[in-house]
Image: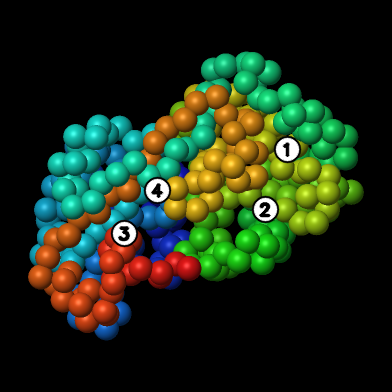
Amino acid sequence: MKGYLSPVYAKSLGEFGTPYQLSECGGWILKRPIAGSPYQDAMGCYPFFDCLDWSKLHRDLDNLSDELVSFAMVTDPFGNYTQDDLKRCFNDVFFPYKEQLMTDLTESPEAYISHHHLGCAKKALRKVGVEVCEKPDYYLDDWMELYGNLIKKHVIRGISAFSKKSFENQFLVPGLVAFRAYYEKHTVGMILCYVHGENAYCHLGAYNALGYKYMASYAIMWTLIQHFANQGLKFVNIGAGPGVKGNLDDGLNQFKKGWSNCTRITYFCGRIFDANKYSEIVQAKHISDTNYFPAYRNGEFR
């Protein structure tokens, strides 16, 4: 299995829960102890839950009903499910979460990439080179330095802060394609992607001061789109804006939108297996009204 379906990727998140494969549908979740209680709950792997057979997910969740207090996940935007499939599994929490910006690679890039982005890409490529890394793990230390800059710049905490141990595993995940921008042989930016089937996911991107100065992100994205189109892939998931709902006016969202020609919706799904235990934990933690699910984990990734 490749990308977010790979057990190696699930292992990379082991600091946030115990990876567990669902036997019927083939997806991976993270079982987690609930602080201050003898119980446990689970979450789908970050950023998306994916599985081989969505029609069997309800069986796995039914089988877990005696083990867990609750379960929460965000759906893979390419998942082969319907809203009815999801509602069958999640009768407690279910709503459209984020609009994922996509690139349909069957269209000519010049037809949808913004003139601004094309101009920036051409300008950037006069300064930096871009390569598809044959051995991504060779650049792990470079990546850690770049991602460290991103963490400081955006004050990233929680699961998306990723430790070096986590990235060591992520760099071993089948389906990883790493794009590296360089200036005078020195790495100035990278984007990590996962390929599964006919689709690619832009997983993470990071840059240093020179990378920002020379607009390495534009050079990499232009190269990335051309590369995956030449590989015969159909879609690239560029991602959504930051925040819970994705700010359409945010600079990062505008950057992603300039490469996109279509969108897909992800869904946030939650299920309470034991209402009594759930209420017991919420009351013990003195949780006030919140839309966060599960309520007793409000603020955990801030």
Whether tag 1 and tag 2 are in contact, CB under 8 A, the answer is: no
- Horizontal relation, residue 254 to residue 124: left or right: left
* CA distance for labels 1 and 2: 12 Å
- Which comes sooner in the sequence, label 1 or label 4? 4
* CA distance for labels 2 and 4: 20 Å
* CA distance for labels 1 and 3: 37 Å
Q: Nearer the viewer, residue 265 or 292?
A: 292
**Residue holding disc 2:** 206
- Which comes sooner in the sequence, label 4 or label 3? 4
Q: Position of residue 48 (x, y in %)?
A: 40, 48
Residue 269 appearing in the image: yes
Rendering quarter of residue 63: bottom left
Q: Position of residue 29 (x, y in %)?
A: 31, 57
User: What amino acid does circle 1 point to?
Assistant: Tyr
**Residue holding disc 1:** 218
What residue sits 55% from the left and 24% below the top?
261
Q: Position of residue 198 (x, y in %)?
A: 46, 28
**Residue holding disc 3:** 291
In this rendering, the label closer to the viewer, 1 or 3: 3
What is the secondary structure assignment of the residue under circle 4? loop
Whether tag 1 and tag 3 are in contact, CB under 8 A, the answer is: no
- Which comes sooner in the sequence, label 1 or label 2? 2
- Which comes sooner in the sequence, label 2 or label 4? 4
Compared with residue 17, is residue 48 higher up or lower down, i.e. above or below? above
- Which comes sooner in the sequence, label 3 or label 2? 2
In this rendering, the label closer to the viewer, 4 or 3: 3
What is the secondary structure assignment of the residue under circle 1? helix
**Residue holding disc 4:** 48
Rendering quarter of residue 37: bottom left
User: What amino acid does circle 2 point to?
Assistant: Ala
Rendering quarter of residue 155: bottom right
